[in-house]
Amino acid sequence: MSVYSSIRAFLDKRIDYPAAIAGAIVLGSIVFFINMDHGWNSALLAAAKQATYTFFAGGYMVRLNERIALALNPAIVAVPAGMVCAGGLAVSLTYLVHSLKGTPEPLNSTIPTMLLISIAFLFLGARARDKRSREQSTQDAN
């Protein structure tokens, strides 16, 4: 197996690509507009960091959220646990990335992540449990 194939297999298993792309576009755009008052260069740098980070880390956090939501029982505990664990990690890392270098408004650039993750991770965790439940029902019927 080539290095490329190994990396691709690793990422395919751990990143939710549709969520990664959607998150990168949405959050990158929001961070761009938040930082526009500091000039195009600063805004583009902040947006690029956010989009890149969101693609890799956000795609991974979505998978982590789903794994936690599926691993615990009952659902009323599992879904919020996925949101708190994966979401807390995502928000902390987002703030860290923006604080390290170059983002003029690191806290303001992190707020959209906080708000969107709370809603999205609850929805995605519940959706993962529902999907597993439907798959199990189909298997039981056969």
Image (tube, rainbow, N blue to C red):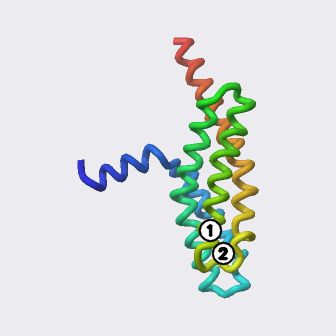
Q: Helix, strand, or loop for circle 2?
A: helix
**Circles 1, 2 touching at the beta carbon (< 8 Å):** yes
Binning the other alpha carbons within 10 Å of mark 1 as few (below 14), some (14 to 19) or many (20 upward) gives: many
Place residue 58 in its image quadrant. bottom right
Q: Is residue 103 above or below residue 23?
A: below
Q: Nearer the viewer, residue 94 or 117?
A: 94
Residue under numbered circle 1: 28
Q: Nearer the viewer, residue 71 or 137?
A: 71
Q: Helix, strand, or loop for circle 1?
A: helix
Residue at left 62%, top 24%? 133
The CA span between labels 1 and 2 is: 6 Å
Q: Is residue 47 left or right of residue 15?
A: right
Residue 56: x %, y % from top left: 51, 57
Q: Is residue 103 above or below residue 141?
A: below
Place residue 21 in its image quadrant. bottom right
Residue 77: x %, y % from top left: 72, 32
Binning the other alpha carbons within 10 Å of mark 2 as few (below 14), some (14 to 19) or many (20 upward) gives: many
Residue 57: x %, y % from top left: 54, 56
Residue at left 61%, top 60%? 93
Q: Nearer the viewer, residue 114 or 89?
A: 89
User: Of the residues shown, which amino acid type is indicated by label 1?
Assistant: Gly
Residue 75: x %, y % from top left: 70, 29
User: Of the residues shown, which amino acid type is indicated by label 2?
Assistant: Phe
Residue 32's disc is: 2
Residue at left 60%, top 80%? 102
